[in-house]
Amino acid sequence: MQYSFMGHKTNKIDAKGRISIPANMRGDLGAEFVASRGFGKCLALFPIDEWDEFMKNIHENVNHKKRKQLELFFLANAEKMSLDGQGRLLLNEELRRQVDLLGEAQAEVFGNGRRIEIWNCEQFKAELSQITVDEVEDILDEFDL
């Protein structure tokens, strides 16, 4: 298991709906990847092998009724994509609408370990600010890390 993506950066969304993916995240994303809804109100970019593993885990470990819900949520919103020559991603208009990026001039690009997430800047800051050092320490203690 590799956790290649880390850090976050605020990047501009241009008039055509394109956003630049930071150079330090591009290589591990691969020439082709899957963009879909993420966990929470964000878009997620999965390297192909991570996407395949994620969907396999859903298929093998979730009961039929819940699996159908997860597959509908993720697969109906999924699209194979690639970056253009300048490292930009053309964001699907419907996905931008679903995660409050439609009409936004910028978004937060977050390297979340095994995937890249693209968030509405204000929502990302709100999520990040909700996490306290005490909570992190409690979780680390709980799992003996």
Image (cartoon, rainbow, N blue to C red):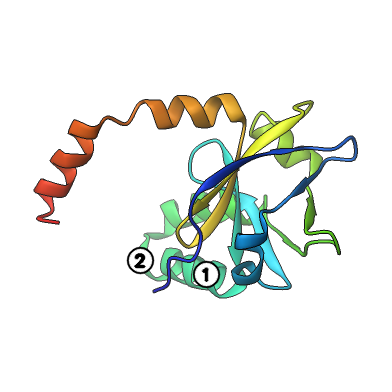
Q: Quadrant of residue 116?
A: bottom right
> Residue at left 67%, top 72%?
30
Residue annotated with mark 1: 50
Q: Residues within 10 Å of mark 1 (few under 14, many from 20)?
A: some
| Residue 106, image x, y percentages | 72, 32
Q: Nearer the viewer, residue 72 or 125?
A: 125
In the image, residue 70 above or below residue 123? below
| C-alpha distance separating marks 2 and 1 | 16 Å
> Residue at left 43%, top 65%?
3
Residue 115 shown left or right of residue 10 in the figure: left
| Residue 35, image x, y percentages | 67, 56
Of the image marks 2 and 1, the number of the one nearer the N terminus:
1
Number of dots carrying numbers:
2
Residue 141 shown left or right of residue 37 in the figure: left
Q: Determine which of the numbered discs, if any, sits on residue 70 in the image.
A: none
SS at badge 2:
helix
> Residue at left 39%, top 74%?
1
Residue annotated with mark 2: 61
Q: Which residue is at the far right?
A: 16
| Residue 113, image x, y percentages | 45, 59
Q: Amino acid at mark 1?
A: Glu
Q: Amino acid at mark 2?
A: Asn
In the image, residue 78 above or below residue 124? below
